[in-house]
Image: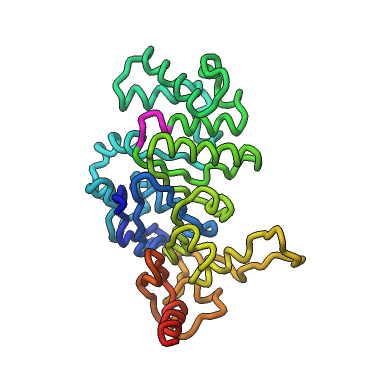
Amino acid sequence: MKEKLLEVKNLSVAFKYNGKYLPQTRDVSFDIYKGEILGLVGESGSGKSVTSKVLLQLLPATGSRILSGEALFEGEDLIRYPRKKMYNIRGNKISMIFQEPMTSLNPVYTCGNQIQEAIMLHQKLDKKAARQKAIEMMEFVGIPLPESRIDNYPHEMSGGMRQRVMIAIALSCNPRLLIADEPTTALDPTIQAQIMELLVQLQQKTGMSILYISHDLGVIAEICHRVAVMYAGTIMEIADVHDLFYNPWHPYTIGLLNSMPQMDSTAERLDCIDGTVPHFSDMPAGCPFAPRCKYATEQCRAGGLPPMTVQGTHSVRCWNSVNRKEDAANG
């Protein structure tokens, strides 16, 4: 049986809006096993980045609040971990790659200095040894001529090279968990493919776990072992990547898959899900997807449903799926 590295249980986060704290995510639960890549997918505004930032205590101290839940990393609750001690976790045991490398890197420091900073802080190496380790990390992530590129500033590198610098920073202290928050969003398709291939190779070499956040199901299908589908701050479905793509249960998951371009399709237009993700200040009483779901009933609109296992490790939060499972059981 696989060993769990991270257990997120019933996590609810609220943000201050018009003087009140309103939930942004509700009862988010998922596990990440050692050596696996878990994909977290959903439309913009679903709460994916909020969930990842909670794990590293990166949400603002004012204006946000943890309502409930825990995030157990190697047995310790990251949410209630003392902020000063989080420095030993953040960038060391857990690292993060952010969406846009140009805004994540400091423009007035060389790329080498920014890699060295984490190494000197967490591995207690002197400046000379840290510089050598930084050169090795740049070579490790595929940056050519690292001995000279180490003194380049971010603006002197291409988008793909800047993202490789970000990956080098994230991996410099051999983290056990890497959070990749849409790391290829700002890159062209060729560079995207290179970065994805690089992440998979590095994961296989180091044995680390990855939480890969994306809205691109094509990327998720290519690199992830399991997938969690998130909508309006709620995990709707979790399954092995093969099961999710070939046997989805939740109508939202089915809608996302149907909206993907297909090579053999003769349709002139892609399918789309009508409507938009609701704002966290105006959430429906029941299932948050009910206003956009063609299968929604009064039962869906009246109240929520805890995650239900439909087969193996495949779980879903949907009344329609409950009825579908009961119909299958009754023949």
Residue 138 vs residue 108, the one in the foreground:
138
Q: Main secondary structure of the magenta part?
A: loop
Question: Residue 52, how many percent across, how many down?
Answer: 40, 49
Q: Residue at x 59, y 33 (%)?
A: 160
Quarter that holds the N terminus: bottom left
Quick check: is 246 in the magenta stretch? no
The answer, for residue 17, to whether it is visible in the render is yes
Magenta-highlighted residues: 170-175
**Total label count?**
0
Question: Residue 33, how many percent across, how many down?
Answer: 34, 50
Task: Left or right? Give the position of 94 relative to 243.
Answer: left
Q: Vertically, is 284 above or below 115? A: below
Q: Residue at x 56, y 50 (%)?
A: 219
Q: Vertically, is 216 above or below 189? A: below
Residue at the far top: name it. Answer: 128
Quarter that holds the C terminus: bottom left
Question: Residue 231, how many percent across, how many down?
Answer: 48, 64
Q: Vertically, is 144 above or below 289? A: above
Here the colouring is rainbow
Q: Residue at x 58, y 45 (%)?
A: 185
Q: Vertically, is 324 above or below 269? A: below
Residue 131 vs residue 246, the one in the foreground:
246
Question: Residue 224, how many percent across, how many down?
Answer: 48, 50
Q: Residue at x 58, y 64 (%)?
A: 257
Task: Left or right? Give the position of 35 relative to 186.
Answer: left
